[in-house]
Amino acid sequence: MICPNCGTSDPGPGSFCMSCGYRLPAPTKAAPAPLVPGKQPGAPPTPASAPPAPPATSPPISQMGSAGTVPVSVWGPFAGYGTRGRHVSWLINEQGERADGLRDAVSARFARREIPRATVEPVKLVRQGVLVDTRPYFLIRRGLTTAGLYIARFGQDLFVSQVTYFKGPISSMRILIVAAALLFAFIYPVVYGNAFSQIGVSLYGGIGGGNPSNLIFLTCCLGPLYLLNWLALGILALFSGYKWLTEKDILAALRVPPNEFDIDDTVALEKSVEQTVREALDTVGIEQRLMPQATETGFRRRLI
């Protein structure tokens, strides 16, 4: 049996294809050959002309959500690409059979457009969960911005989705603050221990050697700062671990939001990807007016 959705020659023994999850048609039993007058059952067949070749079939159409399932994934599909910005989508009626053709046209159009300092890579992204599905995306990366483009058949319709992620630059000032906090955390115990050892207490209540004011200053003034410093480092470690588990970005606390230059570069990439898809529609015979202009970009605000 051949899977009618993905073309796998051996989809498996069950009712669903092991490659793409498509429900397989029920097997049919071959009808017995009719008896020919004067011919005994079981006799060798007489030579006959070859049966006509079956009509050629088109390649399987990629259906939305039918790219197969994989085991556990602890990260989301766009983990590691930064903070999500604009996410827009279009549904074009009665054009689902042109999904694969549009993907090929978009791939060829990306090669001709040559977006400056950008790379285009077709990848399969995995959704977070226990049993998850994979979906084919175009990932267009330029600098700190990544645009994801998804084209698939949704029933009899054509679905196009575009999402943007931005990974902010690492701040030099935040690096200096963290470095100073780590330096203070490891140097303070040494200085405090030296100051304490220089002060001796006699059996008669006298204090000998050293300057007691140094120890008082380290204990009363810098002591609380030392505890707060370790508390801040602990919160930073917990936040970094949380960002690694959710977004695969352990340096998220050192990143800053995008500035005006970054937003301009991101919008330019978004418009280039959107225009590429619109021009590819003409190649497969779909009118561009069915895919109107998307709204302006925007980024979610971060707490830090």
Image (tube, rainbow, N blue to C red):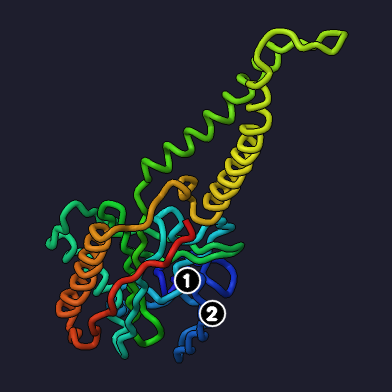
Q: Which residue is the site of mark 1?
A: 1
Q: Residue furthest left?
A: 112
Whether residue 13 appears in this view of the structure is yes
From the viewer's perspective, is residue 160 above or below residue 190?
below
From the viewer's perspective, is residue 204 above or below residue 94?
above
Q: Is residue 107 left or right of residue 214?
A: left
Residue 27 - label: 2
Q: Nearer the viewer, residue 142 or 54?
A: 142
| Label 2–label 1 contact, CB within 8 A | yes
Q: Is residue 93 left or right of residue 38?
A: left
Whether residue 61 appears in this view of the structure is no
Percent of width and height locating residue 85: 37, 67
Percent of width and height locating residue 66: 46, 72
Numbered disc total: 2
The amino acid beneath tag 1 is Met
Percent of width and height locating residue 31: 51, 86
Residue in the image at 44% along x and 46% along y? 254
Q: Indicate the secondary structure of the residue bearing disc 1.
A: loop
Residue in the image at 23% along x and 68% along y? 273
From the viewer's perspective, is residue 262 above or below residue 255?
below
Residue in the image at 51% along x and 71% along y? 21
Disc on the earlier residue, 2 or 1: 1
Q: Nearer the viewer, residue 277 or 301?
A: 301
The amino acid beneath tag 2 is Pro
From the viewer's perspective, is residue 43 above or below residue 166?
below
